[in-house]
Image (cartoon, helix red, strand yellow):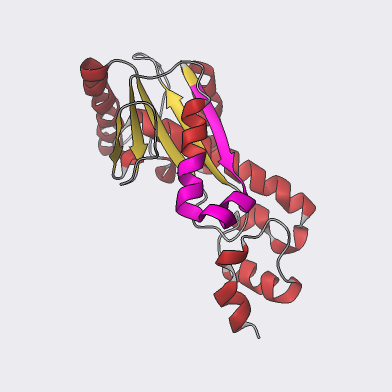
Amino acid sequence: MREDTAKRRQALLDYDTALRTQFGTICGVDEAGRGPLAGDVYAAAVILPENHGIVGLDDSKKLSEKRRDALFDAIQEKASAFCIAVATVEEIERLNILQAAMLAMQRAVAGLKTAPAYVLVDGNRMPELPIAGEPVVKGDATSASIAAASILAKVARDRYMTQLDAQYPQYGFAVHKGYGTKQHRDALLQYGPCPVHRPSFLGKILHEGK
């Protein structure tokens, strides 16, 4: 492993250790799926023990799909508590995507079997929670707990989109996971939207196709 990678991963652990010393049990929270044109938005909350022994824990964006899949299992096995939650396409449309993502994160924290003393949320906004906490910009590259949550949320959502691909194979969900790639946009113009698309995200694309 490259020295800079090892230092980065150690920094994630050190960040959490300092906060545990200050607050006690901490929880990392992250979401996946705010940007896609289709599908639910996912969130995960993770409480890691001090010495969790999860090898290679890192920002999900810096990991291969194979490595994320392996860590997905390791995190669930070794976490003190975790919960993966969603907000549906219907809720995204009713609330807007930001508020739906906040709702998914609230559900993830509420679903933990153990309540943490302090919550770290990736980004610059906090959902309303009955527990103290703070937002951490680029949190998945800062905190091991948030990194773990980002992996759970991303892998769970990617697998969900692969399942949707079996129902709606014409859109290529397994490939682009609902994001607005050329393949996806072309399929939308050819076939129109399906029930898992987010109508409020499609106006410009469908208008351009007329």
- From this view, report whether residue 2 is shown above or below residue 175: above
In this view, the residue farthest toward the bottom is: 210
Is 14 drawn above or below residue 103 in the view shown?
Answer: above
The foreground one among 124 and 1 is 124
Q: Residue at x 21, y 18 (%)?
A: 22
Count of labels shown? Answer: 0
Left or right, 47 with reference to 20: right
Residue 86 within the segment the image draws in magenta: yes
Name the one closer to the observer, 87 or 163: 87
Give the residue drawn at x 39%, y 15%.
Answer: 49
Residue drawn at x 29%, y 25% as measured from the top left: 13
The segment highlighted magenta reads 82-103
Residue 88 sits above or below residue 193 on the image: above
Quadrant of the drawing holding the C terminus: bottom right
The answer to whether residue 67 is seen in the rendering is: no
48 sits to left or right of 66: left
Residue 27 visible in image: yes
Q: What x and y, as percent, mark residue 177?
A: 60, 54
